[in-house]
Image (cartoon, rainbow, N blue to C red):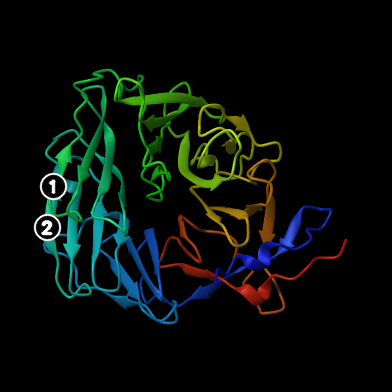
Amino acid sequence: MSSLRWLLVVFAAVGTARAQWEILPSGSTADLRGIDAVGNGVAWASGTQGTVLRTTDEGKSWVRCATPPGAEGLDFRGVQAFDASTAIVMSSGKGDLSRLYKTVDGCKSWKLAFTNPDAEGFWDGILMNRLESDGLLLGDPVAGQFSLWSTEDKGGTWSRYSSRYAPKTLTALPGESVFAASNSSLTQDDHGRAIFGTGGAASARIFISGSADGGYDSHNVPLAGNTAAAGIFSIAFRTFLSQYVIGAAHFVAVGVDYTKASESHGTAAYSVDNGETWHTAKTPPHGYRSAVAYDGVAKAWVTVGPNGTDVSTDDGRNWRALRPNAAPQDPPDADQHWNALSLPFVVGPHGRIGKLRPAAITPVKP
């Protein structure tokens, strides 16, 4: 059962809720950017200095995995796991500093699976399908085109996306790129469409596969910023029943300027029509946000960033801050210093790992 089910509470008129992350001992000092909760008590985390962590007991204890060969100085921005034994980590860096390593023995050993062949490339996100064998890998533009690879054998081999049917489908605007902040700028909906978000240009954009010409369609997303440090940092979706569209999808995108952590204007947007049109959140999150996730049991969206945590129960239209709870002795900054989400876990700098505490969420009286 999801730890977010208790988010269905009555929020105070001031717009806050008593909910918090339980801070867990990770035994690491690395800056953690990747987290993937597999279920059945298993989760994997990744970060700087070639760090990979794994838990098999719901986060009570975390074990430092063997460092992949030659990865001591790499920054693992993404991790995708299939179970307690099999996982892939993605490092981000220029050229061959972007790599994939795979383990099949519970991270006792690793094999180099793929190295970025583009000298000017930079990988931003990896997404694997646990139920199948396919996956996607996304990188910044090379020669003006966003870089995409796919796998059909659980990450053993990778092939570059071919845009021969639509050569301009992945063309980037001047300065446009993807942010590798939380391994959540890339997702795939229930239709099998690949979706990724961008920034760093005059307008943040969403790219969605499955266009009429076999390529990608792009749509502007009304986030604030319009600087090299601003744009979409994370996308999530949920499907819902519609009399007009089978498997209709509702999307939420968060981000804006990571150099202005407390700037709240234009930090979130939402779409109710499969990503075709986007609207700015009426009440935005309370600062730059690097990750967002949806929990279907709680029917709630959660987003995190350096200066706090926010929740929305109306599909991204309005966001309310989650504050530390003094009753279970939460530290005063328990809501802050977070990079990435895979519910119920959250990770951040200096080995910081949290888990949403179910019993901490109680109704707040006006």
Q: Based on the displayed image, in which of its 4 quarters is residue 136 positioned?
A: top left
The answer to whether 363 appears left or right of 26 in the picture is: right
Q: Could you tell me if residue 37 is visible in this image?
A: yes
Q: Amino acid at mark 2?
A: Leu
Residue that appears at 38% across and 62% down: 36
Image x and y of residue 282, in percent: 70, 36
Q: Nearer the viewer, residue 17 or 150?
A: 150
Mark 1 Cα within 10 Å, few/some/many (few <14, many 20+)? some
* Rendered position, 41 above or below 364: below
Q: Residue furthest front?
A: 243
Image x and y of residue 342, in percent: 45, 60
Q: Are marks 2 and 1 in contact (CB under 8 Å)?
A: yes
Q: Quadrant of the image for the C terminus?
A: bottom right
The answer to whether 51 appears left or right of 318 in the picture is: left
Residue under label 1, please give it: 115
Residue under label 2, please give it: 112
